[in-house]
Image (cartoon, rainbow, N blue to C red):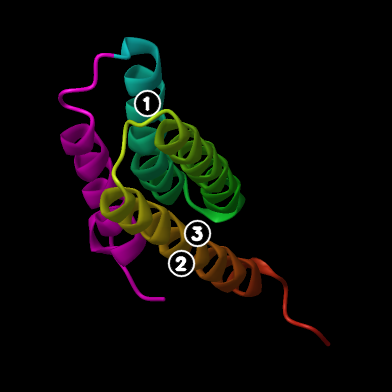
Amino acid sequence: MAYRSFEELDVWKRSCLLAVAIYEALKNCSDCGLKDQMQRAAVSIASNIAEGCERGGKDFSRFLRIAQGSLAELRTQLYIAKKIGRFDDDNFSNLVAETKEIAKMLTGLRKSLTRRLEPPKK
C-alpha cells in the first residue's frame, strides 16, 4: 500500500465520483430533507478518507470506519428514496452496487492498515 496522499487512493477517487453521482441524481429532487441528508452522507465518505489519511496511523483506521458508517447511512437512504419513488431501478441499482464496492475497498484498506500498524510478532 504505497501512496503519498489521499488523492492517490482508488477508494477516495470512487467515493468522490459517488458523491457527484448522488448530487446529479438528486438535482431535481424536491424533498430537501432527504436530498440534503443523502448529499451530506455522500460527501462525508470521501472527506473522512481524506482526513484520516492526512492524520495517519490509528486515526486513519478510525476515520475509515467513520467513512464506512456514512456509506451505510447513504445506502439506507438510497433504499428509502427508492421506496418513495425518487430513483428508477437502474440508477438505484448502480448506486447501491457502487456503495457495496466502496465498502469492500474500505474494509480491505482497513485490514491492510491494521497489519501494517501491528507490532511484529516474535
> Where does residue 7 sit, x and y in percent of width and height?
23, 56
- Tag 2 near tag 1, CB within 8 Å: no
> Where does residue 96 sit, x and y in percent of width and height?
41, 53
The residue sitting at 56% across, 41% down in the picture is: 66
Range of residues picked out in magenta = 1-30
Task: Count residues near mark 1 (Cα–Cα under 10 Å), then give few for <14, some for 14-19, many for 20+.
Answer: some
The number of discs equals: 3
Camera-nearest residue between 122 and 118? 118
Q: Earlier in the sequence, mark 2 or mark 1?
A: 1
Disc 1 marks a residue whose amino acid type is Arg
Q: Quadrant of the N terminus?
A: bottom left
Disc 1 marks which residue? 40
Task: Count residues near mark 3 (Cα–Cα under 10 Å), then give few for <14, some for 14-19, many for 20+.
Answer: many
Q: Quadrant of the C terminus?
A: bottom right
Disc 2 marks a residue whose amino acid type is Met
Question: Which numbered dot is residue 111?
Answer: none
Camera-nearest residue between 16 and 120? 16
Relative side of 37 to 62, left or right: left
- The reply to whether the magenta stretch includes residue 12 is yes
Disc 3 marks which residue? 103
> Where does residue 71 sit, x and y in percent of width and height?
48, 44
Question: Which numbered dot is residue 105?
Answer: 2
